[in-house]
Image (spheres, helix red, strand yellow):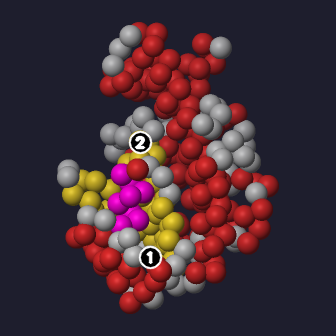
């Protein structure tokens, strides 16, 4: 688990993509800002991450998987293939809350529809990254599709390393050596989102234990604390944790 901390405890990753991911992680999941942040993240990922030829964001709307943001409409086809099969990397990343990497789409057979459609569209590698908000659940998945397998290799390694080892400083990770500035920004933003997620979840557990209440009531309590303090959930959670130390 990432060490509980507030985004204010250390210098934030530079760049608007990382900042949008951090802002989303500290926002209540019912916030009206969530959808606009998802669109911002998709646009900035396609614009700033050199390895990503295209970007989209998958979310659940009711019981249906939906592409809520896309860098260009053409790429919705590969998302729709996965929704039709109810299987694919974007769905797994959202449902499981973990990154799902496909280093070579042509060699992937576990998702038949995706396996057939991606190479036909010239998409040879992908990674779907969970986007967290509210109580720390994945509210969406950022899907990065690439024409270049080699360019995606360090990005996939960086994202997966940060997820598996959240206490490691991504700035010094060897996997980032082959990344452009946008790729490093994405990995750093994801690392900070994981840290915020850990902070919020620890605060919720403290509230639940202290008040002997349900997880939903604990979350509502944290949202009220954030609203009264005029802060996001990350800052409210960090303040509560520091008060209990």
* Marker disc for residue 108: 1
State the image coordinates of residue 93 (x, y, percent, origin top left).
Answer: 42, 57
Disc 1 on helix, strand or loop?
Answer: loop
Horizontal relation, residue 85 to residue 179: left or right: left
Q: Residue furthest left?
A: 63
What residue appears at the point 49 percent right and 43 percent down from the top-left corner? Answer: 25
What residue appears at the point 50 percent right and 17 percent down from the top-left corner? Answer: 206
Magenta span: 88-95
* Marker disc for residue 242: none
Horizontal relation, residue 153 to residue 197: left or right: right
Residue 94 among those drawn in magenta: yes
Disc 2 on helix, strand or loop?
Answer: strand
Mark 2 crowd level (few <14, some 14–19, many ≥20, 10 Å Cα): some
User: How many numbered marks have been drawn onto this rendered protein structure?
Assistant: 2
Name the image quarter holding residue 216: top left
State the image coordinates of residue 209 (x, y, percent, origin top left).
Answer: 45, 13
Identify which residue, 214 or 200, lies in the foreground: 214
State the image coordinates of residue 92 (x, y, percent, origin top left).
Answer: 38, 58
What residue appears at the point 35 percent right and 14 percent down from the top-left corner? Answer: 213
Question: In which quadrant of the rendered image does the N terminus lie?
Answer: top right
Residue 187 visible in the shown view: no
- Residues marked 1 and 2 touching at CB (< 8 Å): no
Q: Residue furthest top?
A: 211
Which residue is label 2 attached to?
Answer: 137
């Amino acid at each position: 688990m990432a060490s509980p901390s507030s985004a204010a405890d250390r210098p934030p990753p530079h760049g608007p993509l990382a900042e949008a991911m951090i802002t989303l992680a500290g926002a209540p999941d019912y916030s009206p800002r969530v959808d606009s942040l998802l669109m911002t993240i998709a646009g900035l990922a396609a614009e700033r991450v050199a390895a990503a030829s295209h970007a989209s964001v998958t979310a659940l709307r009711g019981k249906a998987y939906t592409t809520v943001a896309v860098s260009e409409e053409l790429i919705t086809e590969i998302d729709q293939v996965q929704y039709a099969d109810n299987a694919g990397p974007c769905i797994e990343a959202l449902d499981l809350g973990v990154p799902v990497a496909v280093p070579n789409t042509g060699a992937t057979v576990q998702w038949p529809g995706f396996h057939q459609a991606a190479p036909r569209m010239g998409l040879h590698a992908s990674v779907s990254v969970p986007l967290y908000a509210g109580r720390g659940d994945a509210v969406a998945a950022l899907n990065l599709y690439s024409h270049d397998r080699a360019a995606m290799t360090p990005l996939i390694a960086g994202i997966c390393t940060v997820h598996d080892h959240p206490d490691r400083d991504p700035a010094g990770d060897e996997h980032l050596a082959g990344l452009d500035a946008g790729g490093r920004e994405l990995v750093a933003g994801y690392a900070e989102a994981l840290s915020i997620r850990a902070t919020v979840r620890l605060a919720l557990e403290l509230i639940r234990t202290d008040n002997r209440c349900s997880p939903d009531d604990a979350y509502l309590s944290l949202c009220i604390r954030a609203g009264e303090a005029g802060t996001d959930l990350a800052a409210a959670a960090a303040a509560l944790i520091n008060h209990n130390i």
